[in-house]
Amino acid sequence: MQGTVTGDIAETRQPYADDVELVSRCLSGDEVARSELYRKHASMVHSLAWRLLGDPNEAEDVLQETFLQAFRSLSRYRGEAPIASWLRGVTVRCVGRYRRTRARRRRESRELPEVIIDPTTPDPARQIDVDLALRRLTALLSKLAFSRRVVFVLHEVEGYSLAEAAQILDISVSAAKKRVWRARHDLERLAQDDDVLSVLFSSSLAAERSSAAKSPEPAR
């Protein structure tokens, strides 16, 4: 019997049966399933794009492009990882293309790059506001090299393990570890003049240094 895309996917129902079922419905032309996929994951895609780009309006553009690309290539999803992880990979690639297009347009129009500035001055004596810290971290992330930024966001912000982040980005675990390590130190340096973020990084970097004392710096 000749196999079908949906039939092949259905054979991989474990361990992400719900995701496989939803994708199979999307591939069969079920518009309700497509709406469900968008509704379940749009917020995650927008949040990731925002953290990588530093601009909510640009993140909205990437959100739409991500789902356009995702629906065109859903047949490539094999059920070997959660659909959310697969969508994060699509998002990262769309962000990369968006950044290249944005850079080209800026060169052509001779525009200066945007500088994200948060004029809010925090009170060091008050309890750190998590939302404020996230906004400032997003602004700071825009100053990192993109290759370090994206793996840092996936691992430290989105909560993926280094192995999972490496799989999403199609890089080795050692490369992911190296980029996260360098991103942390870049951010620590950049955060020195920020009362909110310097507190956060001073505690996290102290723990990291304690661990690093027992193991060498990631190999190049």
Image: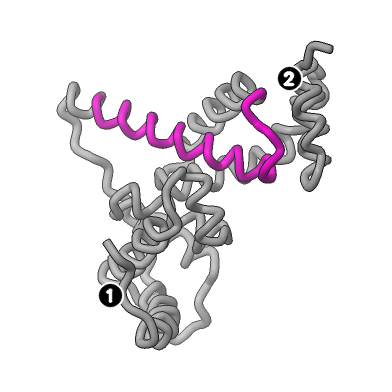
Are there few (<14), some (14-19), or many (20+) residues within 10 Å of tag 2? Answer: few
Magenta span: chief secondary structure: helix
Residue beneath the point at 51% across and 37% down: 91
Whether residue 124 can be seen here: no
Q: Which residues are magenta?
A: 75-104
Residue beneath the point at 47% across and 40% down: 92
In front: mark 1 or mark 2?
Answer: 2
Are there few (<14), some (14-19), or many (20+) residues within 10 Å of tag 1? Answer: some
Label 2 secondary element: helix
Q: Relative to the observer, which residue lies in front, 175 or 118?
A: 175
Above or below for 19 versus 8: below
From mark 1 to mark 2, how far is it between C-alphas?
A: 52 Å
Specify the quadrant of the image occupied by residue 138.
bottom left
| Number of numbered callouts drawn | 2
Does the magenta portion include 71?
Answer: no
Give, as a three-letter code, the residue at label 2: Val
Whether residue 57 can be seen here: yes
Specify the quadrant of the image occupied by residue 164.
bottom right
Res 5 label: 2
Side of 117 relative to 16 (left or right): left
Side of 112 relative to 2 (left or right): left
Instruction: Locate residue 141, reporting x and y percent.
Output: 36, 56
Res 192 label: 1
Label 1 secondary element: helix
